[in-house]
Image (spheres, rainbow, N blue to C red):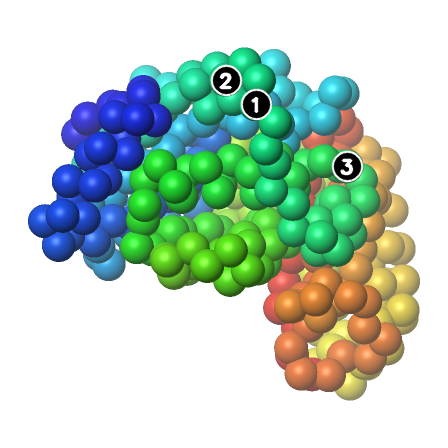
Amino acid sequence: MKIIRSPKQMQGISKEIKDKGKTIGFVPTMGALHQGHLSLIRRARQDTDVVVVSIFVNPTQFGPQEDFQRYPRPFRKDISLCRSLGVDYIFHPLASWMYPEGFKTYVLVEDLSEVLCGRFRPGHFRGVTTVVAKLFNIVRPDIAYFGQKDAQQAIIIKRMVCDLNFPLKIKVMPIIREEDGLALSSRNIYLSPQERNDACVLSEALRLAQGLVKSGIKDTKKIICHMRALIKKKKSAKIDYIAIVDPKTLKPVKKISGRCLLALAVWIGKTRLIDNLCLKG
């Protein structure tokens, strides 16, 4: 396994791999790898000849009051995990190489980036799509892997890939959860023991909604009302949003019909957590 810092060097390596007729599987991350990330790497290892993992805490997707400075960066542990799974290259650039002096170009997927998390984190998805577009141009993957936990991000990236004719496939892999249902996240380490217990209310609320739909309730306002009541029982919880939307347009739906995306963002103490579930009418 090799660690590459220079975007230009990574581009050269990718070209050599492509010239040999080999396929590249790519897992973009911000590090602090957990079993969710590792599930993506394992799938990339199965599907493709060469696996590249990027580890880059992208400054442009963090707001002024967000956790960029304290975001976990256990790089040595991440290296060990990648090596154990047979990763071929880690791409770990400096921010000054990704965004050199005079950088002026950004990628924005309109509408999809302005709702749900985009409403509460203005500019976040512009930072995500810009860095992912750059990474795709540098790594030149045949398949890129993303987790369903970041459902809105995956939907936006799929739209970008389609709209800008990137020659690659996006694979979105299932959410990996703890035994008690909490979706794995690098930010879970911020939670105190009590907050960690309270955080399970997110997955509990999703299961509640799923049960309501199975019992015949299709009215999304009623479902969301029940979820809010459950979450508000936790004193540490503050809801940013609970939404049931079309999984392609992210527009709200009034009645459960066909496939819908149920997504929520909740602060547990000072930690913002997201989770989601696919509902079927």
For label 2, the residue is 100
Q: In the picture shown, does residue 236 fall above or below 184?
A: above
Q: Is residue 154 visible?
A: no
> Residue at the spot x=40%, y=51% of the render?
145
* Discs 2, 1 touching: Cβ within 8 Å: yes
Whether residue 145 is visible to the viewer of this picture, yes or no, is yes
Distance from disc 2 to disc 3, alpha carbons, whole Å, reads 23 Å
The crowd level at tag 1 (other Cα within 10 Å; few <14, some 14-19, many 20+) is few
| Quarter of the picture holding the N terminus | top left
Q: Position of residue 19 (x, y in %)?
A: 14, 48
Q: Is residue 239 above or below residue 225?
A: above
Does residue 206 appear left or right of residue 134 in this picture? Answer: right
Q: Amino acid at mark 2?
A: Pro
SS at mark 2 in the image: loop
Examine the image and state in which quarter residue 112 appears. bottom right
Q: Residue at x 13, y 54 (%)?
A: 21
Q: Which residue is mark 3?
A: 122
> Within 10 Å of the Cα at label 2, are there few (<14), some (14-19), or many (20+) other Cα atoms?
few
